Amino acid sequence: MSRDRSLDIAVTGIAARFPGAPDLAEWWDAVLAGQVLTRRYERAELIDAGVDPRLVADPDHVPVHGHLADADRFENALFRVSPREAEMMDPQHRLMLETAWAALEDAGCAPRSAGLPTTAVFATASSSGYLRSMVASGRLDPLTLEDALHGTEPDFMASLISYKLGLTGPAIAVQTACSSSLVAVHLAVQALLSGDCDQALVVGAGIAHPQHGHLHVAGGIHSATGDCRPFDADADGVVSGSGVAAVVLRRLTDTEEEPGPDPYGVLLGTAVNNDGSGKAGYYAPSVDGQESVIRAAVTAADVPADSIGYLEAHATGTRVGDPIEWAAASAAYAGLGAPAGSIAVGALKANTGHLDNAAGVAALIKTLLVVKEGVVPPVAGFRRLNPLLETEGSPLYVPDAPVEWTASEPRRAGVSSFGVGGTNAHVVVEQPPVRPPRAARQPRETGELLLLSAQDDAALDRAATRLAAHLGQRPPAPALDDVASTLVRRAALPARLAVTARDTAEAVERLRAGRHGTVRGTAAGAPAPVVLLFPGQGAQRPGMALPLRAALPGFGAALEECLAAFPQDVADEVRAALLDTGFPAERLAVTSLAQPALFAVEYAAARALRALGIGPVALAGHSLGEITAIAVAGGLELAEAARLVVARGRAMADCPTGAMAALECDPATALALAEELGCALELAAHNAPESCVLAGAHGEVERFLARIGDRVHARPLRTSHAFHSALIEPALPAVAAAAEGLAPRRTTLPVALNRTGGILPTGSTPTARDYVDQARGTVRFADALAALARRHPGAVAVEVGPGRALSAMAAAAGLTAVPLSPDRTERPAEEVLAALGTLWTLGQPLSTGALCAHGEPVHLPGYPFAGPRWIAPEAAARPAAPRPEEAAVPAGTVAGEADGREGAPADPAQVLAALWADLLGHTELTDGSDFFALGGDSLLTTHLARRIKLELGVKVPIREMFLARTLGSQREIVRGLLAERDTAPVG
């Protein structure tokens, strides 16, 4: 009879920082090899770390510890924590934030994203040596102490994680000493089963400050030798270690219904109890309590005990604790039916030392890897069994070498964690469910788009390097579409990298050579404004819709809608020209076909871009492209625009043929040269400050090019007509007739006009005359671009159509140009995907899921944390220097006046900047600096108000300071209050 799986809980994400290894993969290799990862310190490094020299010199001091490297580093900017707040925050709280972030990433969830499931946080940390060190320094004033408590006390850690990561489920601190984090797992499971949340994050930390070792006391629990040997005959006690670990939990049924990375394993049953008073003393363990909790967990799991092949023991290596735990576990599992010698025992503390409040989750992570990989690690340093352990009939045995799993499958294991005071926890774990293999998939024509981001460029470089190493060294590498799908589930941060690749080798190469951009936008973080540019005739090429159809989501459907607006014969020929690279180029160059073909591609691409998240602030089109711009702006309904374009193209095709020449000079110079050389030419277009086009009869253009020599660089354009010249005037009556029948419509976006170079404002209604004038008049595109650049400085100009001619013009106007389909390589569809990636790197809010989520999420390296090092708490506790005026100056007295000193009152701008620098730790401040963006909060605002009163003698309204936010705005508030006080009537 199959068991009910509705109560099973999947572990979907893990993250940890453990002693002796830079990451989980190397840590697992070390555990499998039975390596001892604790470290024996030298005297000098302990003193340098701030350990009391008297303790270091004590003969009973054992300088061995599971040392956690870089425990003083913290990516404060990622979490919007000010430098001052980071200094005051316990390293445990800092690394819990980072590890929680990494675990959520590993589970396929982006911290701070709107789409997160309701996520609970259960957090625990050891007592704060950091706080004790600050208090002992004697340098904390009452307000600074309050800040220090918020950054170090356990009451605040769970809610801080929820706040910084945007998690909305219950946030609960759990404190049961050594068993805290496994108790937190039990509580998280209960929260999931009761419906309090849909996802639970459990994070535990145990980080000593400073990391140094322990003082051995005869009869105590700490090892005299510095070796932790659980269940060994030479066991003499425990060794401490520092670490932080986190797991993400979800109901197993939910993971089967929704895509996500493969679970690491499944929690089948959990239990928690307390020894009560039935033991030798408060600190003593209890056989009955431990046996009872194991029985309860196995019963809750509803699996036979003989199906469990591994037990990760609490295993402190103490003379009293080990025999009691062995007896309790043997009695529990034997009593439930486990045969003798069937359960291998593990003891992580032998590798890393005792990680205190993080020990339970650390043991769980190790056990998850055991059942997932099917390999049982040895107990590090184990030589011979403690003779005090009862082995007769016991299901337990201690492996002294790594062994392949030989117990029954599915692989199941138990995890024990026991806290001082008697709170016991046990969890039963099963290997992850076997998922059916995915069907083979053909690589996409475009390749895949890999999007990485980080808080700064250095972190982005580390992320790219780590991902490249992971893809290049891990056999077999995950499918590239799975990698792309995973990366878009992560937070989109300021420094960004977009890489296209068709296979893993190419991805590795490009990640290693990646160039990246940062988000552009206003001080408030908004993306840069976008202007869409639509090219005119001459940009067309056979098959030009194929790359867009392959790479731009929504383009194909929008194109079919455009084609349906044309007469059937036109639609058929346009479709053939757009979707067949072998279509005759000379036929597509005919005006009657080129214009509707370009319109269809541009209009469909614009529709698709807007659906993807690109919201333009203005539009501009070159010649024919202006009609596309007006249609996209709502000034023309699609069917009417299609009729106008067809009529315009046919009428122009019937005009006398002509020629055009492009010159690298300004229009005045070009016209003067034409007049000097005796050539009857007109100015057809002014494209950039030093770029224009002349047009006229074939003979006039040929004579001009023959006579100009090297005075100005000039070249003929491939065109059949002299557009925007007198030779096009025969087409104007037909254009006018087609335009007369258009229904008047108001535009919903500004459009830069060719004829004037100005901007047609939103809400305007183009007239029939406008379409005639734009067909005949000079294209003043340089002026139009300049007008857009003035109105939208820093804008991104996207060339929506084939080619990149307009992008060069936009760049000359000072805009950031991105050609959507530049046609530079033999992989044009990949170019389109790369252009979309470029827009994302520039901060544009693209729907990345539509671009990249074609695969399934997998586990990939997470954020490459390597933040700044933060100073010792003695230096961090920096109260302001004693101010006699705090006690002596009456309220309302300006600094410098109370004791009769002469001189001008303090400058409020300087005072306020100094207070910001002191409270936040930032010194590079401008009027636009945002108090809250720099890590300030409502509590610091109250501190700021108090300090302003002390320094300047005015009481500032907290709410006004809260709303003002910027340094400049707050300065004006203070100046206004000072002015009111100084002009108030006296008496």
Image: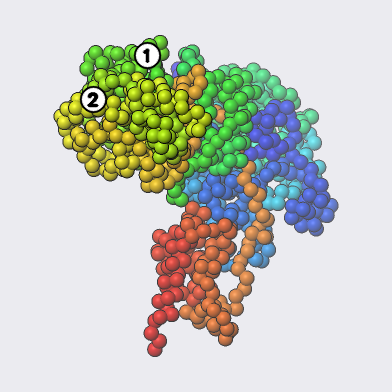
Q: Is residue 694 above or below residue 793?
A: above
Q: Residue at x 47, y 29 (%)?
A: 708
- SS under mark 2: helix
Where does the image place residue 906, in percent across and percent down from the top left?
54, 74
Give the camera-side residue of 397 and 966: 966
972 in relation to 102, above or below: below
Amino acid found under the numbered disc labelled 1: Glu
The mark closer to the camera, 2 or 1, is 2
Q: Residue at x 25, y 39 (%)?
A: 747
Side of 167 relative to 138 (left or right)? left
Q: Nearer the viewer, residue 952 or 631?
A: 631
Of residues 456 and 487, which is closer to you in this image?
A: 456
Q: Identify the mark at residue 731; answer none if there is no mark.
A: 2
Q: How many marks?
A: 2
Q: Which residue is mark 1?
A: 586
Mark 2: few/some/many CA within 10 Å (<14, 14-19, 20+): many
Type of amino acid under label 2: Ala
| Residue at the image point whose x is 17% and y is 27% from the top | 737
In the rendered view, does 294 fall on the left or right side of 977? right
Give the x, y percent position of residue 44. Answer: 81, 51
The one nearer the camera, 853 or 776, is 776
Quadrant of residue 335 within the rendered picture: top right
Q: Where is residue 59 shown, x and y percent of the image?
A: 84, 52
Q: CA distance from mark 2 to mark 1?
A: 22 Å
Judged from the image, the secondary structure of the residue bearing numbered disc 1 is: helix
| Position above or below: 659 against 456 | above
